[in-house]
Amino acid sequence: MSLKDKLNELHERGLAEIKKSGDLKDVNQVRVSLLGKKGPITEVLRGMRDLDAEERPKVGAFANEIRDDLTAALAKRREELENAVLNAKLTNEAIDVTLPGTPVAKGEPHVIQQIVDQIEDLFLGMGYQVLSGPEVEEDKYNFEMMNLPKNHPARDMQDTFYITKEILMRTQTSPMQARTLETHDFSKGPLKMISPGVVYRRDTDDPTHSHQFHQVEGLVIDKHITMADLKGTLQVLAHELFGDKFDVRLRPSYFPFTEPSVEADITCFNCGGKGCKVCKNTGWIEVLGAGMVHPNVLKMAGVDADVYGGFAFGVGPDRFAMLKYGVDDIRNFYLNDVRFLNQFTKKG
Amino acid sequence: MKISYNWIKEYLDLNVKPADLAEKIERTSVEVDSVVKPSDGLKKIVVGHVLSIEAHPDSDHLHICQVDVGEDEPLQIVCGAPNIAEGQMVIVALPGSRIADNVKIKKSKMRGIPSAGMICSLQEIGFPEAVVPKTYVEGIYVLPADAMPGDDVYDYLGMNDSLIDLDVTPNRGDMLSLYGALHDLSAIYDLPVKFDQPAVKEAGEPTADQLSIHVDEALAPQYKMRLVKQVKLAPSPMWLQIRLWNAGYRPINNVVDVTNYIMLKYGQPLHAFDYDKFAGQDVYVRNAKQGEKLTTLDEGEHDLDPNDIVIADEKAPIALAGVMGGLDTAIADGTTTVAIEAAVFEHDHIRKAAQRHNLHTDASQRFERGVNRTGLQDALDAAAQMMDELAGGTVQAGTVVAADNVPAPAVIDITMTHINAVLGTTLDQPQVTHILEMLGCTVTAAGDTLTVTVPVRRNDIHIPADLLEEIARIYGYDELPATLPTGRMTMGELTTAQKLMRATRHSLEGLGLNQAISYALTTEDKAKMFLMQPSETTKLAWPMSVDHAVLRMNVITGLLDDIAYNSARKVKDVALYEQGRVFYREDGTERPSEQEHIAGAITGTLLPAAWDQPAKDVDFYQVKGIVAAYLKDMAVNGDVTYVANTDMPEMHPGRTADILVHGHRIGFMGQVHPTVAKQFKIGATYVFELNLQAIIDMPKQENQYDVISRYPAITRDVAMLVDNDVTNDQIVELIEKRGGAHLQSVKLFDIYDGVKVPKGKKSLAYTLTYQDKHETLVDDAVTQAFEKVEKRLQDDLGVEIR
């Protein structure tokens, strides 16, 4: 048998043994027996001394090739076996992935806050400032400078918590209109602001009335502000809060501090405008009051009503939340039942 | 005000359904509360002729009636009404009919006698009792004799009309009448309107010879009277009764009904006096005198106020002007001479009188909002003429006009440029002029400027802005484009304070607390609890309830109320925070100052028990961890320290700490005193409250980059026995002070005060970490520094190193 034949035989036998090896120990034994110093390959190589000088490099190269191939086969077999061991171990470590995750402590913003934040962010993006005013107001700002003199019949529309004759719990966020108009420097640019906050009315709490609720006032005053701008702004607001499918319509109304005054309705959520019980079959739901700022309000705040004008609006986040989520009792917002608060967890 | 669709159609050639008309009114004019057709929901209710009646054998009040309902055979109906009589035309609900409230009428037996249907009262077919003529309140209604048996009753009773209920805003007094509404609809639909004004047929003596009126013109700028003699009181004709009850008025007689009808039609409240009951021929319009009394038509007795306006004769007040007439001079059986008053009273006086006497009448409502100052004579004439026609009265010659100060019409200049600039439209002059003319204005144009003369009846229009509203609403708000403001750019950005308040909320939510919004008005007791600084309470002058009568001076009590609410509903684990204002008032000032606070309250467990995690009741240190993490988030620049406070009455004396930044107290935290918790009916609760304004105002630590050392850190642990009254703060402070240049941190990792520790002592164990930023620390150097600290601990605090 030539050396080459021997090597070929060794190669085949080696590969068979490697294949047969069942664990890492076997693999090691095979490696030692095949490739070790006393192994057959080494022996064959030793036999090369007897070869011709011509033959020797060829057989040597061939022997090396075979050794390399066996080495690679051993490594491959080792890896296969290692993987099998690891896989068996991992299989053993399997857990029930359907068990609940460990609870983490996590709080939620109040649903009213979420709506206020959403409104703030929308208007910040349109270049409005956010201003907050005092909750305990002067009659002057809450009423008189809003074109509601002492004997104005519309004061009856707003039952007021008075503290003294001149001091009261603000019934609306509108006093911030007067306060801001008084101080705004129009040479620096137009006035664009919203003012969110808590307001108070002398009401008995029931499912649709609360002596405390929220308002967001909006005010834009510049040289060329139109009622069409008001309509467009309210449309953007409705789309932001409720979705693009919602339309806005304006209806005539009356507020002493705006002229013209309008109520804004949006498409009924419940029926999408077809008419249902919620919207009293009109397809529309009243959501806010607005209008073009009354010249008297501007004049009383020292703004030249012949040059400047604009619009104002007041929205009720409580009402928005009630409409948006179908909340049937406004008191839920102020009783802070955890089961209620945890229903509004969606972010973004 | 309920306005009749059929009535409108008499004057306006409208071709729209009632619901569409109502929608149009709502979109263009005033809000509509409802549109109701009274016959809706009723079925098979017909005229019946009572052919005969006999007493029910088993009843002392029931009658067995044979009723012709236009069919071959009469129906036998058992009826219990006291006023049933042979020959009457009555309202019959046939078997299978539906009456008010969707009640179904079936054939039945009443005390053994078969009864095929029901003879109805007006209430039973849906009339409010308040509009049913007095005669028929207690029994069935009797239809006119010419009604046809078998016909549906609805047309006989005006029930096929549609009634549009207008919710008129305070500025639109003109809409409180048919004529006012017609004017608006005329402009809305661009249709001419046919107003009718009857001529008065005068006869008899001059009124002026029979009546002298003395008026304080400041109280009544307009005041007129007519006299109608020889009236014969009787029920009004059916058409008039229908108009009245459909508008919500009870028909009374052909004089009183006329005054109500004219008010509905013209908007001018009228009052009819029985002239013969006047003491003398002189009538005075004046302020009431101290001590005067008046019994009004509704039999209410009123002590008059000197600010009330009264109509008086020689002796006494006979009416509360503009509000309600007096009972003594009321139209009643036997009245033959009627004095009709048409006047305008000063609105503020009327508003206050109505409030003072709690008499909000249709007349006072109209005077408060202002009536048509140019329409008094027409209304007075029409009323007098109707009393002639309906009650056979003789209208005396002339009107006594005691005052007739009609204001001049408003004349307003407005430019087309201004109109389009404010509305955002591109209207042209003919469009605008047409709208204004349809509203009754006179318009003259000169270049860009329109000079608009406004009819006096539109007392809400004074300035250009008022005209803009008229133009916009008639043109249609739907026609306005929708744009966004253009012009100079502005930055929209939250202020630093606003950013911090948002960050505060996010931080606390991240730490596991739900945001609460509680009531800021509370009880006096609760307002005064958990006070962080001395303050007077601020009270409402007229609270609705004691629960919400005083402004809060702390936020915690609101949260405790919330916890109580949850606890009462078996929700035991509650973690809430609230950001809101407290109201501190200094003695001698009226108005409190408002301070932003942030507070939290936790009861039960912060993390719910789970299969892999046992429940752990909230404790002081958990809340302290939250407060500390929050203050770290706020980057409060300065040492935050917690100092035991044993003196807050609402707090556990052993588990309360003041929170100080740089030695300045910004709040407190700890466990609510068990007695207070019991008052609130809640379990063990931990709270904190911080002056958020102070946090806003404090300097903040900016984020900055610090090189992370590449050299290894070395740690040393030390355990020591110390006296119980030595605090962690003392030990840490000492270690930090004496730890050497390379000490990076000190961390408490164990506390033990069990059996192996002598009494009065506790065992504390700390890990000290040393590191140098620039080179590898040598072990010897650390050992040296560590031993130095151990020695100081022994010397200064008397600890025993273990």
Image (cartoon, coloured by chain):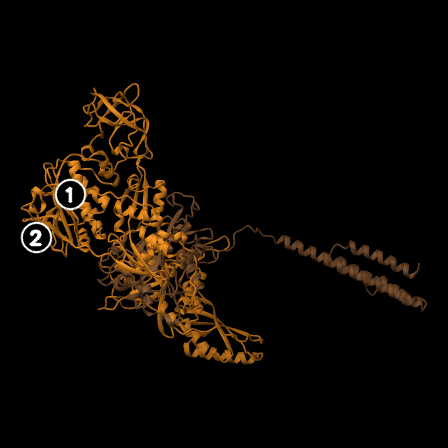
Q: Mark 1 — on which chain does it sit?
A: B
Q: Mark 2 — on which chain does it sit?
A: B
For disc 1, the marked residue is B298
Q: Colour of chain B?
A: orange
Q: Kindly indicate which chain is depicted in brown in the rendered structure.
A: A
Q: Is residue A223 above or below residue B106?
A: below
For disc 2, the marked residue is B291
Name the side, left or right, on which A242 lies relative to B770.
Answer: left
Quarter where residue B553 is shown: bottom left
Please name the amino acid that badge 1 sits on.
Answer: Asp
SS class, disc 2: loop
Which residue is painted at 26% across and 50% down in the image?
B174
Residue B287 visible? The answer is no
The spot of residue A294 in percent (x, y) is: 31, 61
SS class, disc 1: loop
The spot of residue B655 in percent (x, y) is: 36, 65
The spot of residue A92 in percent (x, y) is: 63, 53
Q: Does label 2 or label 1 sit earlier along the sequence?
A: 2
Tag 1: Cα neighbours inside 10 Å, few (<14), some, or many (≥20)? Answer: few
Which quadrant of the rendered structure holds the N terminus of chain B? top left
